[in-house]
Image: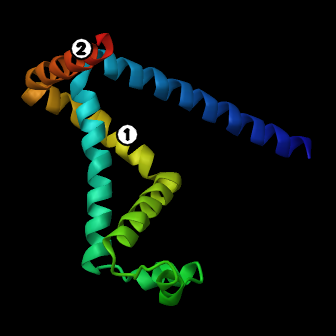
């Protein structure tokens, strides 16, 4: 039992160490690349929602499979005036699917892609993104001062 605890403790310690290193790397990337890093990360996040919505809405994945997993039927939706083909239902499922994928490992993949793509984005459109970020910041400052 003590051996098992020591193994778990070392795993927890290693996890915390990786988490700390990750936060440090994220901070360094944000300082170094600024708006380019934020742009890459947000574009990847928005893309995951758009791709998931498109896949669900187009019928590439049968929505009834997801509903059957939760023991829901079309009649359950009809009680609320909805159907499986409604955009609102697809939107709700999109959020649920993406959040589930985030929990299962999509977030580390998105961060890895952000770290990989950011230097290229900064080199190609970084100055333009910085100008846009300054304009957006000035808009919020004006609203805050009113």
Q: Could you say which is closer to the camera, residue 117 or residue 13? A: 117
Reply above or below: 67 against 119: below
- Dot 1: within a 10 Å radius of its alpha carbon, few (fewer than 14), some, or many (20 or more) residues? some
Residue 112 vertical position relative to residue 30 in the rendered view, above or below: below
Q: Is residue 107 left or right of residue 130?
A: right
Residue 50, x across and y down, in percent: 26, 58
SS at badge 2: helix
Q: Is residue 77 left or right of residue 144?
A: right
Which percent across, then down, holds residue 136? Answer: 20, 23
> Depth check: 21 or 140 in front?
140
Which mark is in front, 2 or 1? 2
Q: Nearer the viewer, residue 92 or 33?
A: 92
The residue wearing badge 2 is 142
Q: Check residue 29 in the rendering and tell me which mark sits there, or answer none.
A: none
Q: Which residue is mark 1?
A: 111
Looking at the image, the residue that sits furthest to the top is 145
- Residue at the spot 47% in from the left edge and 85% down from the top edge: 78
Q: In this view, which residue lies farthest toward the right?
A: 1
Q: Residue furthest front?
A: 146
């Amino acid at each position: 039992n003590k051996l098992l605890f020591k193994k778990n403790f070392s795993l927890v310690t290693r996890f915390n160490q990786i988490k700390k290193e990750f936060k440090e790397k994220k901070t360094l990337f944000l300082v170094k690349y600024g708006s380019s890093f934020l742009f890459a990360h947000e574009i990847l996040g928005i893309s995951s929602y758009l791709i998931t919505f498109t896949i669900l809405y187009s019928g590439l994945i049968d929505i009834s499979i997801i509903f059957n997993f939760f023991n829901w039927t079309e009649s359950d939706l009809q009680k609320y005036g909805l159907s499986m083909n409604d955009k609102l239902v697809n939107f709700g499922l999109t959020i649920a699917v993406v959040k589930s994928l985030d929990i299962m490992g999509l977030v580390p993949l998105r961060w890895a892609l952000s770290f990989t793509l950011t230097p290229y984005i900064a080199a190609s459109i970084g100055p333009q993104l910085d100008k846009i970020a300054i304009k957006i910041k000035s808009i919020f400052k004006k609203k805050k001062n009113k």
